[in-house]
Amino acid sequence: MMKKLLIGFSVTFFLFRIAAAQDYDTRIGLRGGFTNGFTIKNFFAHNTAIEGIVTTR
């Protein structure tokens, strides 16, 4: 039981490290829930970004 738990945490940690290493300038996404819509985010510098959201209700 402990071995499976340790392996599960290790795999999860490894996958999050890969996801955090992604580098991008512009991304488009979908929003769901009470307000559905689209999002777009553009990074101009390492710590400067602008994000737009178009939603419907």
Image (spheres, grey):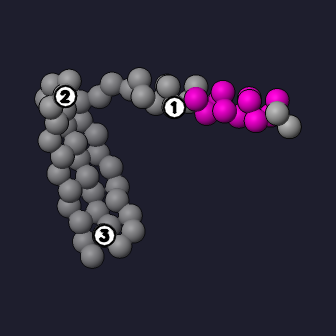
Mark 3 or mark 1, earlier in chain: 1
Quadrant showing the N terminus: top right
Mark 2 or mark 1, earlier in chain: 1
Which region of the structure is painted magenta? 3-13
> Is residue 50 in the magenta section?
no
Residue at horizontal 20 percent and vertical 56 percent from the top:
53
Please indicate whether residue 29 sits to the left or right of residue 7 in the image: left
Kind of residue sitting beneath label 1: Phe
52 or 10, nearer to the observer: 10
Position of 43 relative to 29 (above/below): above
Please say if the residues under marks 2 and 3 sit with CB atoms less than 8 Å apart: no
Task: Indicate the quadrant where residue 27 lies.
Answer: top left
Give the residue at mark 2.
47
Give the residue at mark 1.
16
Q: Which mark is residue 35?
A: 3
Residue at horizontal 23 percent and vertical 30 percent from the top:
25
